[in-house]
Image: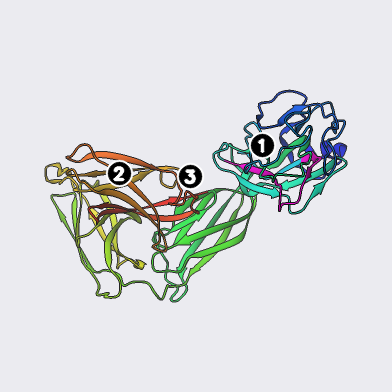
Amino acid sequence: MRLYLILIFLGILTLPFADVIWQDNFEELTGWILNGEFEIDQPQGLGGEYGNPDPQTAYSGSNVLGVDLTGLGASMGDYESDLGLHEYFAISPLIDCSEFVSVELNMMKWLNVEQPAYDHAYVSVSNDNGTTWIDIWTNTNQVTDNSWQSAYYDISEIADLNSGVRIRFSIGTTDGSWQFSGWNIDNIIISGIPVTYGTIEGDVSNSYNGEPVSFVSVMSQYGATLSDETGYFILNSIPTGNREIIINAPGFLPYTQNNIVVTDNDTTYVTCELEPDPDTPPSPQNLQTEIYDGNNVHLTWEAAEYPIEELLAFNIYRNGFIISSVILEEYNDVNLVNGIYNYYISAVYDAGESLPCDPVNVQINTTGNGAESIPLPEFALSNYPNPFNPTTTITYSTPQLYSSLCIKIFNIKGQIVKTIPVRMTQAGNKQYSVIWNGKDDSDKLVTSGIYLYYLQINGQIKAMNKMMILK
């Protein structure tokens, strides 16, 4: 049954043609997590030392979710004084919104809370099963409901296409006086529009000369890809609606294109013209390649003169993907299968990453394996999954034990966001790993985008790589 028929009956308006994802009228126990004086019970009209008391009846049926419905604590029917932040809370069961967009929260509420200079009530939403919360509503003045009121919240930015959604109602902080009756909630409905998918395709070019920009990351909230050698890209399985793409390319200013209208089972074409960054450091020069032992490639290049900033490393790209970061001006790419390989090099400075050098193509065509000539890498650094959300495992190896070793993570602007100290117990190219939860040194989640991460040993950078967070 379509949601709008139900909501017309309840007196709540919502999007037409939306479906009910989840609902609760509190007549049965459904797995709410209750803390403090939150209860699911029959309201009795208690409280109201200040403001108005609880309702005497539910909006429909017998039970509601509310604060101190039955006369708990020192302030009968009211929340208590001197509560901490979100100290009283009620957390919903897990709600699966993974097949819906335009997700909404509708409910009937009867709320009494003092002005926010003293007391606070919140509605919060999580999309990671309650690990982190986003407050979508809090009282901006004193609220004194004396009847049931309909309430609507657009939670699409948090809940769309997510399977780990939970809703939280809370009270706190409160001051030392003037207690109110707090939350009373009935007939919660989570609704959304069943998702359909379309495609975004386009071309990435240099706005200055019209040349294609190859092998750069094109990200959306729902997936990522690389442009090919002609600058062309395609993003499949993008939910219909107004969507956004973000492109971060070395040597160009960050590019965002929004309001891309994706329609069901159709393709939307976009043109992305990137502006060169005037402050981009110079590229490496004179990339040379030499095939040895049949299926190994030796690369050499020269660093450009750039006295302003400190050179940190060189990034080696093969077919658009970074394969290693090195300090020296050479690299061996070994044990390749037959095929054509496109190489280019960029330089990483304190100021950021340079444009890539001119690419060089190499063709491998051999029946031998050349395994006897493959040297083991001295240092290795990688992460999986990549892209990821919200955690990734960073794996590293070294040829010997070191007393001081850490992983440092930088954003695309070159600002450090996280330092992860690590320790070793064995030597000899042993693999170790650490987990990064996507939070910075202040324990705040970082934004979507590309991040650089370094293996630093005794104050020196030994390896570097890139990773991408998608949310």
Residue 49 horizontal/vertical position (percent):
83, 40
Q: Nearer the viewer, mark 2 or mark 1?
A: 1
Residue 397 horizontal/vertical position (percent):
24, 43
Residue 93 horizontal/vertical position (percent):
64, 31
Residue 323 in view in this figure: no
| Local SS, label 3 | loop
Q: Amino acid at mark 2?
A: Val
CA neighbours of label 2 inside 10 A, class few (<14), some (14 to 19), many (20+): few
- The residue under the point 33% across, 66% down is 350
Q: Amino acid at mark 3?
A: Asn
Image quadrant where one finds the N terminus: top right
Could you give the CA–CA distance between mark 3 and mark 1, rounded to whole angstroms?
A: 30 Å
Q: Which residue is mark 1?
A: 88
Task: Look at the numbered discs 2 and 1 and tell me whether their residues touch, using CB distance below 8 Å.
Answer: no
In front of the other: 201 or 81: 81
Residue stretch rendered in magenta on the structure: 107-127
Q: Is residue 148 left or right of 405 when viewed as pictured?
A: right
- The residue under the point 84% across, 43% down is 149
Q: Is residue 203 left or right of 108 when viewed as pictured?
A: left
Question: In terms of sequence position, does the residue under pointer 3 or pointer 1 come before the other?
Answer: 1
Q: Check if residue 124 falls in the magenta segment.
A: yes
Residue 405, numbered circle:
none
Indicate the quadrant where residue 163 lies.
top right
Q: Which residue is mark 2?
A: 422
CA neighbours of label 1 inside 10 A, class few (<14), some (14 to 19), many (20+): many
Q: Which residue is mark 3?
A: 389
Indicate the quadrant where residue 125 lies.
top right
